[in-house]
Image (tube, rainbow, N blue to C red):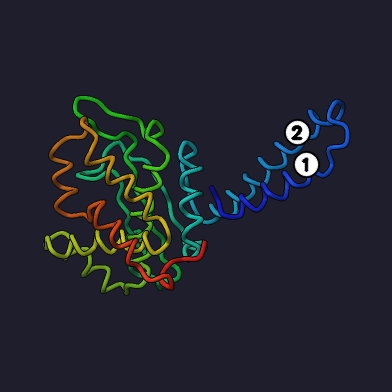
Amino acid sequence: MFQHLSVLLLIVFSTFNFGQNDASTVYHKHDVATKQFVETKIEESEKQILKNKKAPSIIREEIAEVLSYFPELANTQIDFVFKDRINKSFMQAQPKWYGFFQSKSKRDYVIKISRNFQMEGHTIPIEKLPKDIIIGWLAHELGHIMDYQDKSAFALMKFGWSYLTSREYMIEAERTADVQAIHCNLGEYLVIKKNFIQNHTDIPLEYKERIKQFYMSAEEAIELMDNLPDDLLTAD
């Protein structure tokens, strides 16, 4: 959960224990008030984190949680939008077309998300996927946006062309997105997502092979996490 939420819960529970003088008469009312207080604070935190963002309600919590690891994107406009299907992908991060004509600080982005995950012979609605796996996917896409932010308009156009025409460039771009996410302490979620793809028997073999060819493996991600200098990691 959010890093500040753990501090909030500690304060709330400490207050509850200190003020519990008569459990037979006070406990129930105080418990309800505490629950409402915590829920209100969570809602306020989500609203702050989702400022400048558009997020589908059914995965709003996952989006807010993963964004909490990317404070650099707090003022960046990002639209998370559902699509019936995205060619060869489950999610896809892109700058909006008019962003090429704006300064880096004013550039807007969109993360396209497939409404359903394709399995062999059936689909799974995204809200049925485990939360950690959704966060792992979102972490990778936000890693792309972190990479895009540093590029000029010309560099972005070159990136798009090279990504489509060069296998080596595509591999490097996908690796860079994972590295960005790992630097933000989201490596464990990436590993969960990668293991899910490779180990789930109902995921099409063609998709697994594509992931194996172009993306960092779970083992590589773990090795990178283990060897990453502490000063490159975002503080908890």
User: Looking at the picture, which amino acid does disc 2 mark?
Assistant: Asp
Number of dots carrying numbers: 2
- Mark closer to the chain start, 1 or 2: 1
Residue at 28% in and 40% down: 196
In the image shown, does 172 or 96 lie closer to the viewer? 172
User: Looking at the picture, which amino acid does disc 1 mark?
Assistant: Phe
Front label number (1 vs 2): 1
Q: Give the structural element (helix, strand or loop) at label 1.
A: helix
Q: Quadrant of residue 35?
A: top right
Residue at 41% in and 73% down: 103
Residue at 34% in and 54% down: 141
Picture layout, residue 48 above or below residue 21? below
Residue 27 located left or right of residue 231? right
Marking on residue 199: none
x, y percentage for residue 40?
68, 43
Picture layout, residue 88 above or below residue 120? below
Mark 1 surroundings: few (<14), some (14-19) or many (≥20) residues within 10 A: some
Residue occupied by mark 2: 31
Marking on residue 16: 1
Q: Quadrant of residue 28?
A: top right
In the image shown, does 179 or 91 lie closer to the viewer? 179
In the image shown, does 229 or 166 lie closer to the viewer? 229
Mark 2 surroundings: few (<14), some (14-19) or many (≥20) residues within 10 A: few
Q: Quadrant of residue 161?
A: bottom left
Residue 141 located left or right of residue 210? right
Assess whether mark 2 and mark 1 are in contact (beta carbons under 8 angstroms). yes
Residue at 55% in and 51% down: 2
x, y percentage for residue 94?
32, 57
Q: Give the structural element (helix, strand or loop) at label 2.
A: helix
Picture layout, residue 16 above or below residue 221? above
For the residues labelled 1 and 2, the Cα–Cα distance comes to: 8 Å
x, y percentage for residue 74?
51, 61
